[in-house]
Amino acid sequence: MKYIRRLAAIWAAKAAIILGKLMGKKSSSSPGIVALKIYPDILKDLSSKVKKEIIVVCGTNGKTTTNNMLYSLLAANHFRVVCNHVGANMLEGIVTAFIQSADFWGGLEADYACLEVDEASTVKVFEHFTPSKIVITNLFRDQLDRYGEIDITIKLLEKALAKAPNAELILNGDDPLTARFGWNSSRKCYFYGVAQDVNIALNETKEGRFCTFCGESLKYNYYHYSQLGDYLCPSCGFKRPDLDFRAINVHLANNLQFEIEHDGSITSLNVSYKGFYNIYNILASFSTAVLLGVSSDSMNKVFEQYKPQIGRMETFDLGKPVILNLSKNPAGFNQAISAVLQDKRTKDIMIVINDNAQDGRDISWIWDVDFERLLAPDIKSYIASGIRKDDVALRLKYAEIDTKLFTTETDIKKAIIDLVNRNGDVCYILVNYTALFNTQSILKKLEKSKEWRMENAKL
Amino acid sequence: MQSYKMTIGHLYPDLLNLYGDRGNIIALQKRCAWRGIDAQVKEFKLNDDIDFSSLDIVFLGGGSDREQLLVCNRLKEIKNDIHTFVDNGGVLVAICGGYQLLGHYYKLKNETIEGLSVLDIYTEMGDKRLIGNVVIECNFTGNPFYVVGFENHGGRTYINGHTPLGTIKYGYGNNGEDALEGVIYKNVIGTYLHGPLFPKNPALTDHILAMALKKAYPDSFDQLQPLDDSLENNAREYMIKRLL
């Protein structure tokens, strides 16, 4: 009976996946919903077939990239890996990922599963399986109206960790809110971080710059961004733990170039994509793969070939480069602004902010973003778009950006065509979550059809 | 024309900085600057001494539970200074957590946090958090106007005989029961509205600035010079239209 239910669940979900593909859906949790309805133990069942280890990646920013990098490192070493690539990271999305990897008879040939899991879903997901390694990338303010405050996220993760008492933790040591999970912990914990001052600190909202144990303000030898850095609590002694995986000799000028020191050996890395935060994504996946026994020798090649996920500094050719980036919370947005400012070409910028349920209904966080920094001479103009375009425009006004330099446009396609026909050498489009897929697919279509040329435009 | 000066005291921004409340300070400051009023913002850390008599507007935001408790303990030490400031007609704006602290107490499940009793209000923890967009109608100037914001609070606040800041047109407000939002008392405004509140609601912001200027320059100040608020109004009216 169980066998039949399992088969029914898998067939129904696989049918839903195919149907979804036919309808052009990108990420999907609905096949997982169907499967769980038919056979609630489907995830328990399939995950138990993973031969070696299940690794879970959580944290506010960088989990999709980290998880996909880890997948690439494992796949390059010929392991078979279950992975929720597109970032469907709640229970249903994880079920869908397993069903995609399973065969029609419910069999699953997998050495590893690497899964990104939404922080709020961890407790629920860990009822179905227990991971052997958990990576936490960082904790920033994000989607506040769903989770309340960051303390609530910490409590949720603590509850989830208690369900997996034997799991090893791989933690961002530079983040006091993340490192706390491994402080004085009896379980095996590994820390990674950037072990030098790279002089990129901004004046921004620093959540968690207070000791989460005693409330004292943390002292920093240096910090990188948000609350990440080399910190020490003068009152209770909490400090950045000794780093097991240390990024050193960091160069940010053109490529990302740095070395990782671990256990006395040094690995040199040099990749062509940008963004300081990608050092953390590489560090997290590198550390995890090394701990799984993967040799670090060939890793640079994998990182260099890694194609950032959609909307992570993704470039399109619309007569000139158009760079799309997902920027869904203050920490991420400020990092995106840094990347924009590092590009010295003249540019026009578009900002798309929606307030759908998955974005967080509350968009007040845009006031915690340092939009003031976008007041730069090589930024020639601005377009505000998305459901909350008027709020974006207002934020720009209060950043003292000349109101004559910005316009608002609800229709994203119209806005993009307008943007690329302006005078800058390059365009940047910063979008939050639900605006991402739509904007990306419009950009793809325009790139192909050349409809961005004014004479081709059908508006 | 006389050149006005104004000092805004931002209390404990490194602890109370939730939900973009930094935008409120930006709005107060810019709306002064755009009128040629020299507005300084002084940020205070937890153990700094505060000379309230040097401040025209005091701003108190909201924080997470842990941070709010730290602030509460400190505020009790300077309770008398705050009372004097309010009694003398000082302008005090308190949002969310800061608003709760102005009352008699905040009753949690297992403990009760004593407040400053600046306002005759009290707060009790509710079952679920009240989260979402809000529209209120304010009527304290004689000309009713709508204010929009976003609320996110677990506490239910009851304001006894106080005048509310506004009445609820959409959302929960003080407690989700009596359709009231916030308090306005003397020159004190307490409210649950983030959003942030001031950038999108210039009528309220200017009302607060005018209160402070009237207090500082009783003889010479008459009214604020109007600004072009079309972007502010677009953003506010979009939400009103969508919600009501």
Image (cartoon, rainbow, N blue to C red):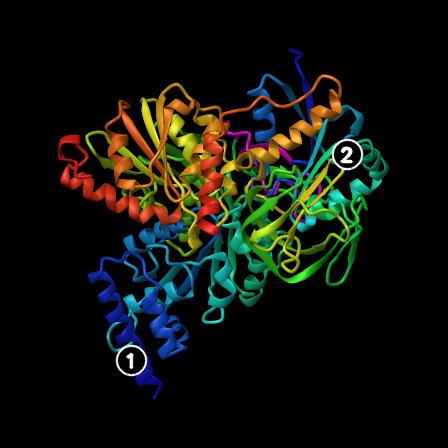
| Residue A96 position by quadrant | bottom left
Q: Residue at x 55, y 33 (%)?
A: A204
- Label 1 sits on residue: A8
Chain letter of the residue carrying label 2: B
Q: Residues within 10 Å of mark 1 (few under 14, many from 20)?
A: some
Q: Residue at x 33, y 66 (%)?
A: A30
Q: Is residue A269 visible?
A: yes
Amino acid on which disc 1 is placed: Ala
Q: Residues within 10 Å of mark 2 (few under 14, many from 20)?
A: few
Q: Is residue A406 above or below residue A89?
A: above
| Magenta stretch, main secondary structure class | loop
Chain letter of the residue carrying label 1: A
Q: Residue at x 35, y 69 (%)?
A: A32
Q: Tell me the element at label 2.
A: loop
Q: Pointers 1 and 2 in contact (CB under 8 A)?
A: no
The percent coordinates of residue B94 (x first, y second) are 69, 41
Residue A205: say if magenta: yes
Name the side, left or right, on which A231 lies relative to A308. right
Q: Nearer the viewer, residue B30 or A344?
A: B30
Amino acid on which disc 2 is placed: Asn
- The range drawn in magenta is A197-225
- Label 2 sits on residue: B47
The percent coordinates of residue A280 (x first, y second) are 45, 42
Q: Nearer the viewer, residue A286 or A17?
A: A17
Q: For the C terminus of chain A, which image quadrant?
A: top left
Q: CA distance from mark 1 to mark 2?
A: 64 Å
Q: For the N terminus of chain A, which image quadrant?
A: bottom left
| Residue A157 position by quadrant | bottom right
Name the side, left or right, on which A404 lies relative to A158. left
